[in-house]
């Protein structure tokens, strides 16, 4: 990971990666004139320091990876609403043990995902109230049924897929757009190759970023802007020729700001003019000056697929059915993990099924002699459970 040597943090930071130790503000030194260093200073830093220190101590992160992980969590925290920030701070005042540190990390991830879901709901509500607005945002509709049945699949942690500070193309120019990959067809793709990210598709925090097909319809990502030299805003959309509304950030000169949002993806449509070859989605810098951006993916919305049930029929050992009479018989038990769906019978000549329901069979005998019949049940489960 030689790209990290370009310094996301000062070297002195490594010396203080100890549980609950204060850590200097993070800075990214950029090899470009006039660039403003990225820095953070929030009350939540001590929580983030504890999480990172614990993961380093447990050999879950190298020191180089720790630098990126710390910045990712800080960006995520800054993307939350003020209400969510206060709630997380209140819940993490006392980190007395490892379990508390892990709980704090999970609470941050859950809060980011929850805000993304809320943002999606607001977008869908706005789209429903103004269905004919030209260029309106076109995103997933996570509801059951038909083509709107979407499932959220989170990555293991925030997966950094793009960072213009380390990308070959550098900053995103004024009123310019750029195409970005949001997932990979195959495991092992290095998001640094053309986007400056630090993630490797399918591994580490980027587990669940590989989709051979069908592809995700939307990506949930935290987007941050860095080195904002002029006032502006950022749009994120499917990267197609129509620049849809999709505004995700607005800033003043000198701001470092982030937001977690849902971005539709589509590799099959023509690319926006001047944005490069078509990828999954696009970012558009609606400002008068260049800006750096960071994209951390936290999950995807994918189309739910119907799955055939795994079913098996189970019959009992049989029963004598009295002459000119009927007998009610309880169904046998289903195997562990299977659910009783409907009763069945297996009958020879002279016998008939009078009643069937989930719990039993009533078998009738039309003859003057005792006959033998079976009661059974169809048991089903969703495969893999």
Image (tube, rainbow, N blue to C red):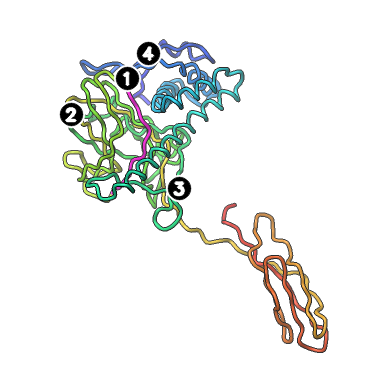
Mark 4 or mark 2: which comes first in sequence?
A: 4
Mark 2 or mark 1: which comes first in sequence?
A: 1
Mark closer to the observer (1, 3): 3
Q: Where is residue 371 shown, x and y percent of the image?
A: 79, 83
Identify residue for label 3. 151
Could you say whether the residue bearing mark 1 is in a helix, strand or loop?
helix
Q: Which residue is depicted at the point 74% across and 86% down?
A: 350
Q: Is residue 127 left or right of residue 69?
A: left
Identify residue for label 1. 6
**Residues drawn in magenta:** 257-267
Mark 1 or mark 3: which comes first in sequence?
A: 1
Mark 3 or mark 2: which comes first in sequence?
A: 3
Q: Are marks 4 and 1 in contact (CB under 8 Å)?
A: no
Identify residue for label 2. 174
Q: Where is residue 196 shown, x and y percent of the image?
A: 31, 30
Mark 4 and mark 1: span between their CA atoms?
Answer: 10 Å
Instruction: Choose top left, top right, bottom left or bottom right for residue 71.
Output: top left
Identify residue for label 4. 10
Front-lying residue, 52 or 238:
238
Mark 3 and mark 2: span between their CA atoms?
Answer: 36 Å
Q: Is residue 315 left or right of residue 171?
A: right
């Amino acid at each position: 990971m030689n790209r990290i040597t370009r310094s996301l943090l000062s070297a002195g930071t490594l010396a203080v990666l100890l549980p609950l130790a204060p850590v200097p503000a993070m800075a990214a030194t950029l090899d470009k004139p006039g660039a403003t260093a990225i820095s953070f200073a929030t009350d939540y830093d001590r929580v983030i320091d504890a999480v990172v220190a614990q993961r380093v101590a447990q050999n879950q992160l190298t020191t180089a990876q720790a630098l990126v992980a710390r910045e990712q969590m800080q960006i995520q925290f800054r993307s939350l609403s003020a209400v969510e920030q206060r709630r997380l701070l209140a819940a993490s005042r006392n980190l007395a043990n490892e379990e508390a540190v892990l709980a704090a990390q999970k609470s941050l991830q859950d809060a980011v995902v929850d805000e993304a879901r809320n943002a999606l709901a607001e977008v869908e509500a706005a789209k429903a109230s103004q269905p004919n607005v030209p260029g309106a945002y076109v995103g997933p509709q996570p509801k059951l049924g038909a083509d709107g049945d979407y499932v959220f699949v989170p990555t293991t942690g925030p997966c950094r897929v793009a960072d213009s500070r380390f990308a070959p193309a550098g900053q995103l120019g004024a009123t310019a757009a750029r195409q970005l990959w949001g997932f990979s067809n195959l495991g092992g793709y290095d998001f640094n190759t053309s986007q400056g990210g630090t993630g490797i598709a399918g591994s580490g925090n980027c587990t669940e970023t590989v989709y051979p097909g069908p592809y995700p319809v939307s990506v949930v990502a935290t987007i941050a802007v860095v080195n904002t030299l002029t006032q502006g805003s950022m749009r994120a959309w499917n990267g197609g020729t129509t620049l849809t509304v999709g505004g995700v950030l607005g800033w003043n000169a000198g701001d470092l700001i982030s937001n977690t949002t849902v971005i539709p993806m589509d590799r099959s449509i023509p690319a926006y003019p001047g944005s490069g070859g078509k990828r999954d989605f696009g970012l558009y810098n609606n400002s008068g000056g260049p800006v750096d951006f960071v994209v951390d993916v936290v999950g995807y919305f994918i189309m739910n697929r119907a799955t055939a049930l795994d079913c098996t029929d189970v019959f009992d050992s049989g029963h004598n059915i009295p002459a000119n009479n009927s007998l009610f018989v309880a169904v046998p038990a289903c195997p562990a993990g299977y659910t009783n769906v409907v009763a069945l019978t297996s009958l020879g000549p002279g016998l008939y099924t009078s009643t069937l329901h989930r719990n039993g069979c009533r078998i009738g005998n039309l003859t003057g002699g005792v006959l033998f019949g079976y009661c059974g049940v169809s048991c089903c489960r969703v495969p893999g459970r």
